[in-house]
Image (tube, rainbow, N blue to C red):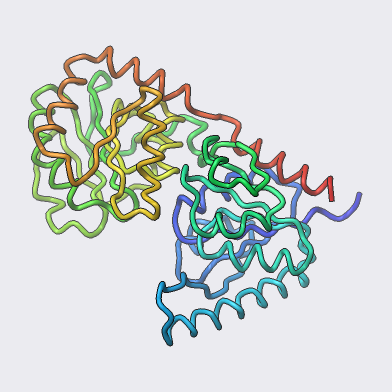
Amino acid sequence: MGSPTRLLIAASGTGGHLFPAIALAQQLPDYKIEWLGTANRLETSLVPKDYPLNTISVEGFQQKLSLKTLKIMAGFLASIWQTQKLIKEHQIDVVFTTGGYIAAPAILAARLQKKPAIIHESNYIPGKVTKFLSRWCDAVALGFAGTAQYLPQAKTVYVSTPVRSQFFTPQPLDLDILIPDDAVVILVAGGSQGAIAVNQLIRKAAPAWFELGAYVVHLTGKNDPEADSLQHPQYISLPFVDNMAGLLQRANLAISRAGAGAITELAFTGTPAVLIPYPFAAEDHQTYNAQEYKDAGAGVVYQQAELTVETLREQVSQWLRSPELLQDMAVKAKALAVNDSAERLAKLVRGLISNC
C-alpha cells in the first residue's frame, strides 16, 4: 500500500464553516488530515483531536486604506507563507476550505505549491472570498444549486451542505422540563450570536402559544440581559445548546435565522420554519437562503425590521390551530434535504486527487 492521501482542511470561525468540514473529514478515514485555523476561534474546541490543528493569524480587510489595513496586509502575506510551509512540510496533496478569511491564504498557498484546491460555498449568494478566488480553485462545491449563476468562471458542483453526524441518529431531548409527547414544540434559535430584537418579539408573542398548548424552547444567545424575564411552565430559555440535533428532531416548528447551516439542518429534520434573516449578513445572503425554503413551501420569511408581535403571534397561532398545515410543510422541508451531501463532497475530493 502507498502512503495515505494528505488533505489540508482550512475552516475557521463559526459552526457554519466548521460543521461541513468536520462532516467531510469523517467521510475520509483513509486520509491523513491536517487542520488550518486560527488560535482564538471555535475550531480550538470543535475540531476533533484526530485532526492536528495548525493556526495562523488572518483578518478581514478594511474598506479604506489605513495603517491597520497595511498591517493586516503584511499579516496576510505572512499567513500565505506559513500555509505554503505547512503544505510542504506535511506533503499535502489537496486543500479544502469552507470559505471565510482563512480560505484566501489556503487557496493562494495551494496555487503557489501547485496543489489542487476546493472551496465549499454554503450560502446562496457567494461571499467575497469565493467570488474572488473561485477561478483559482479546481472545483467549487455548492450548498445551493442556484449559486452557480453567480460564479460563471468557476467549475461548480452542487453537493448541498453536509450536516453534523449527530443528525443521522435519534438524539435525546436532554432538557430540564418534561415535555408531553403529544405537545407541539416551538424552537427559537437566533444563531450563534443570538438575536435580542427577535427575543423580545418571542417573549411578547409566546403567551398566546402557551394557551394553545405549545411549549417554547428559546435559545437566546449569551448577550440578552432580559433572557430570564419570561417565566412559564411551558417555556424554557437557554443561552445555547450543544444538542441542536435533538432539539430539531423533536421540534414541530422553528423560528430561526437563515444561515446556510440552519437551513440545511431544518430541511434535514423536516422542520417547518418562520425565517427571520439576519439583517446585517454580507450581500444579504440570509434572505436568499430563506427564499429557497419559502419557495419550497417549507416556511415563511419575514424581514426583522417589518416583523411585529401581532404578525408573528398570529402566524404561529394559525399553524398551531391547523396541525395539518405544519405536517404538509414538514414533508416539503424534508424534500429539500440531501442526505448524502458529505459523501458527495468526499467523492469530489477523491475525484480531484485521482485526476491529478
Give the residue furthest to the top. 324
Does residue 282 appear to the left or right of 324 in the view shown?
right
> Which residue is painted at 51% across and 39% down in the image?
163
Residue 80 sits in quarter: bottom right
Q: How many marks?
A: 0
Image coordinates for residue 242, horizontal then vertical, percent: 39, 47
Residue 282 sits in quarter: bottom left
Q: Up-down: is 346 above or below 72?
A: above
> Which residue is painted at 28% across and 47% down in the image?
190
Give the residue furthest to the right. 1
Image coordinates for residue 166, horizontal then vertical, percent: 49, 38
Q: Up-down: is 20 above or below 11?
A: above
Image coordinates for residue 23, horizontal then vertical, percent: 58, 44
Viewer-closest of 356 and 163: 356
Q: Up-down: is 241 above or below 210?
A: below
Image coordinates for residue 108, horizontal then vertical, percent: 66, 67
> Which residue is painted at 36% across and 25% down in the image?
298
> Which residue is painted at 11% across and 35% down in the image?
205
Does residue 185 appear to the left or right of 80 in the view shown?
left
